[in-house]
Amino acid sequence: MPRRPRSVTILAVLQALQGLGLLALGIYRGYLLTWLGGAELLISRVTPYVVVDWLTGWVVWITLGIFTLILALAIFRMQRLAWLIAISLQGLGLLVGLVNYIQARPNYAGMIYGIVLVFYLNQQEVRSAFREA
């Protein structure tokens, strides 16, 4: 296995931080639903769409967080497919960010973080490291 460049290690750390953030968001959303009967309060005051969004949202965030942490490990180990999955995941995240922006629900921090990761993934040193892996 070729020597891992420092930029790949930094990329793995950035990806792991994103995974931890997604995991924390999912846990927080799940906690809000159960804290002081939050689900009953939520159901009584909003439309069914919002209820389904909140009930499924925390599961999606936790799943994405775990998947992103596994992806960070794959990047750290320089597995060839990890680069493709990472760039695809960031592209999907930026697409969701754009849709949310159009719907007047922007997440500027998430979009900026995704853009930084896309630029980092496309650095010549990172791309060549995964080509050689």
Image (cartoon, rainbow, N blue to C red):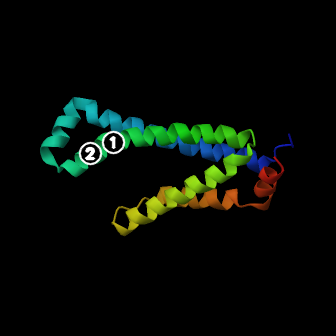
- The picture places residue 76, in percent across and down from the top left corner, at 72, 40
Q: Residues within 10 Å of mark 2 (few under 14, many from 20)?
A: few
**Residue 35, percent from left and from top:** 26, 31
The residue lying toward the viewer, choosing from 128 and 14, is: 128
Indicate left or right for 89 with 42 as reference.
Answer: right
The residue to which callout 1 is attached is 56
Q: Is residue 109 left or right of residue 77?
A: left
Secondary structure type for disc 1? helix
Q: Measuring 76% from the left and 54% from the top, which residue is drawn there?
A: 126
Hey, what amino acid is under mark 1?
A: Thr
Residue at x 85% of width, y 39% of height = 1
Q: Amino acid at mark 2?
A: Val
Which percent across, then down, holds residue 125?
80, 57
Q: On the image, which quarter does residue 68 sit in?
A: top right
Decide: marks 1, 2 in contact (CB < 8 A)?
yes
Q: Is residue 75 left or right of residue 95?
A: right
